[in-house]
Image: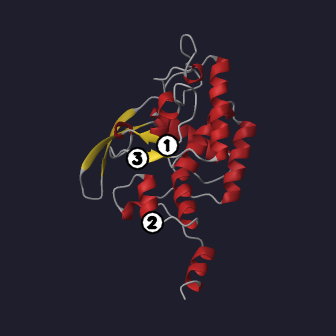
């Protein structure tokens, strides 16, 4: 199985700086990148989560967000926690940007920061949801399952990684999240849960262990 490249912390900072400086829509693109990096969201999930998934009608950001089974790969519901200060700041900026540009706003604008609660949180530059295509894949047990893919958004996000001069792809955010979570003390079972994988073998493919981490693990055994 070909694995997406996991960026180093300095490469991640460079990616965000370049996106901020060169993107035509840095307000939106920063949120897209950070949802992958800090919440391990898949591109298809990012394309489908709604304003109401992330916000209460009062405009307050939810501390725990349920990703509905209908939008996840493998149809397994899981929760994410948008607790990263960078993500929170980026979300506030993007929501304000959408309101100022009248992108997907609601009549009356009294709730949900004035946005249409039913529309995706992430919209295209023309204010439309990203197109989805139904695909099939064979899992490790040889079973075929259907899932939705956001090919155009996936290609766009890969382009953001490439524009920053990295080898990352749209899937790199999940690998970076998994590797960092394990390095910060999470167990492989916790990483599996946070990624929404059915078994540990799937989660283990997402994790990179640096030479320094491996050396430290050996030195700390006894």
Rounded to the nearest whole Å, what is the CA distance between mark 2 and mark 3?
16 Å
**Numbered mark located on residue 89 in the image:** none
* Residue that appears at 66% across and 45% down: 85
Q: Position of residue 173 (x, y in %)?
A: 55, 51
**Outermost residue toward the right?**
21
* Residue that appears at 57% across and 49% down: 38
Whether residue 80 is visible to the viewer of this picture, yes or no, is: yes
Secondary structure at badge 3 equals strand
Q: Position of residue 216 (x, y in %)?
A: 61, 79
Q: Which of marks 2 and 3 is nearer the N terminus?
A: 3
- Label 2 environment density (alpha carbons within 10 Å; few <14, some 14–19, many ≥20): some
Q: Name the residue under label 1.
A: 64
For the N terminus, the quadrant is: bottom left
Q: Where is residue 183 in the image (x, y as percent from the top left)?
A: 57, 66
Question: Residue 220: which quarter of the image?
Answer: bottom right
Q: Where is residue 25 in the image (x, y as percent from the top left)?
A: 67, 31
| Mark in the foreground, 3 or 1 | 1
Whether residue 1 is visible to the viewer of this picture, yes or no, is: no
**Numbered mark located on residue 78 in the image:** 3
From this view, report whether residue 69 is shown above or below residue 9. above
Secondary structure at badge 2 equals helix
Q: Earlier in the sequence, mark 3 or mark 1?
A: 1
From this view, report whether residue 163 is shown above or below residue 124. below
Question: Do the residues under discs 2 and 3 have CB atoms within 8 angstroms?
Answer: no
Q: Name the residue under label 2.
A: 188
Rounded to the nearest whole Å, what is the CA distance between mark 3 and mark 1?
10 Å
Question: Do the residues under discs 3 and 1 have CB atoms within 8 angstroms?
Answer: no
């Amino acid at each position: 199985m070909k694995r997406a490249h996991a960026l180093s912390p300095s490469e991640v900072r460079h990616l965000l700086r370049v996106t901020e400086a060169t993107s035509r829509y840095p307000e939106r693109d920063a949120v897209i990148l950070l949802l992958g990096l800090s919440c391990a969201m898949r591109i298809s999930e990012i394309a489908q989560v709604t304003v109401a998934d992330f916000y209460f009608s009062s405009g307050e950001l939810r501390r725990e967000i349920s990703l509905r089974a209908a939008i996840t790969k493998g149809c397994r519901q899981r929760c994410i926690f948008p607790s990263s200060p960078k993500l929170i700041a980026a979300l506030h900026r993007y929501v304000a940007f959408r309101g100022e540009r009248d992108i997907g706003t609601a009549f009356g604008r009294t709730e949900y920061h004035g946005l249409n609660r039913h529309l995706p949180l992430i919209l295209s530059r023309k204010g439309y949801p990203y197109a989805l295509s139904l695909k099939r894949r064979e899992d490790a047990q040889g079973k075929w399952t259907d899932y939705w893919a956001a090919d155009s958004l996936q290609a766009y996000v890969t382009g953001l990684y490439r524009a920053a001069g990295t080898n990352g792809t749209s899937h790199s955010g999940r690998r970076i999240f998994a590797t960092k979570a394990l390095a910060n003390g999470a167990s492989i079972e916790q990483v599996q849960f946070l990624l929404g994988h059915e078994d540990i073998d799937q989660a283990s493919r997402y994790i990179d262990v640096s030479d320094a981490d491996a050396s430290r693990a050996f030195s700390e055994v006894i």
